[in-house]
Amino acid sequence: MAKENRGLVAITGANGTIGYACTVYALRLGYRVRCVVRSEDAIQTLKHGPSLQQFASQIDYHTVPDNTVPDSYDSALADVEYVIHVAGVWPTPDKHPDHDIYIPFVKSMQNILSAAEKLYTVKRIVFTQAGAAMVHPDDGDTLGTAMDIALNEYTPVHPGLLNLTPPLASPHHAYCAAKAQCMTTLKNLRASGKVPFSIVQIIPGTVMGLSELVSAKTDGRKHMDRMSRALLFNEPKPRYAFGFVNVGDCAKIHVEALDEVKVPYDEVPDWFIAAGSSDPSKGGEATWKEAGDLIESTFQDKVASGLFTVGRHNVPINMPYYVDSALTETKLLRHEKFKGLNECVNEVAEWYRGLE
């Protein structure tokens, strides 16, 4: 159990993969947490979380059904000292590019900032961003798997995304544009010094890891990230990969970034990179094959029984970057290393093997 009160943090999207892990880590570290979600059903899901039940006295809940509405976060952020804004929409083909993706990303950011400016209690806001802001969707599947470009704490967003506005051509266009524009807005706002709180941005790789909210194999496979499914079940290759991060490491980066003493504002880069550093001498093919070989050798019996069908050739179509997260590891992991793809997929496989 936590031994100190480190203040109240609001976590949007607390029922999602990153949000839930952030909630658990923050509680264990001594924060009180306000879980901000869209519905009462989401609250009930969270209340059944095993790790959350032991911290029930440190948690309260708030619903924001529509985060595009002006002032939508005002009451959710009342008396809050810190915010981790994770909530967002994945750009699946069934989503409307403008109304379901671009507008919610932009408006929710604006509404978080507006609420924090009005309330005066907020000290620091951490925003979850995406590597998709560094690529242009019109490049299609031409980026290759060489992994010969550095993705680090100062890699710029793609300039061609900054002028893309609705109507947008696809969910992917909407996602890339919204992320790039939000990241640029926040970077400029931070540089202006015009807000009474500090701003931190984090770019996670593909988040991989177990979920304690899942107990059955059928649900586990649905919950699993796309990289693990491609490797463990030979499902279709993912379209993009911008590094890989264990869900626990991802949560740790978000929560540790709240600490204004350990992470002084003048030492915060453009964005922290929450992903395991990769070997620039290895391309995507070699990186992926190594993970496939590990699964086949570690879980020989489960491969033989058909539980796992190793997708050794399902290399993501676009893997242009190698990850250099050395600065993030130094500042937020205290020189520890992120788990890499091999460790992440091994953990997922162990977890899935143990489900009913």
Image (cartoon, rainbow, N blue to C red):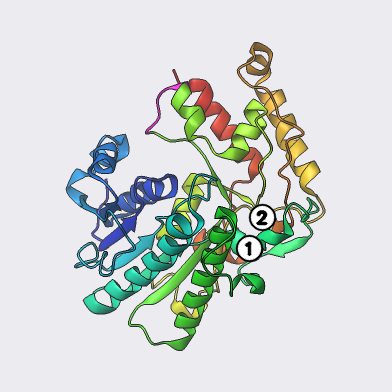
Residue at (55, 45) in percent of width and height:
93
* Contact, mark 1 vs mark 2 (Cβ under 8 Å): yes
Q: Quadrant of residue 177?
A: bottom right
Which is nearer the N-term, disc 1 or disc 2? 2
Residue beneath label 2, please? 277
Quadrant of the frame with the N terminus: top left
Q: Amino acid at mark 1?
A: Ala
Q: Is residue 159 left or right of residue 22?
A: right
Q: Secondary structure at mark 2?
A: loop
Residue beneath label 1, please? 326
Q: Nearer the viewer, residue 175 or 83?
A: 175
The stretch in magenta equals 213-217
Magenta highlight on residue 216 = yes
Position of 210 relative to 13 (above/below): above
Position of 239 relative to 347 (above/below): below
- As drawn, the label of residue 125 is none
Give residue 10's position: percent from left, percent from top: 29, 60
Give residue 145's position: percent from left, percent from top: 78, 50
Residue at (59, 39) in percent of width and height:
226
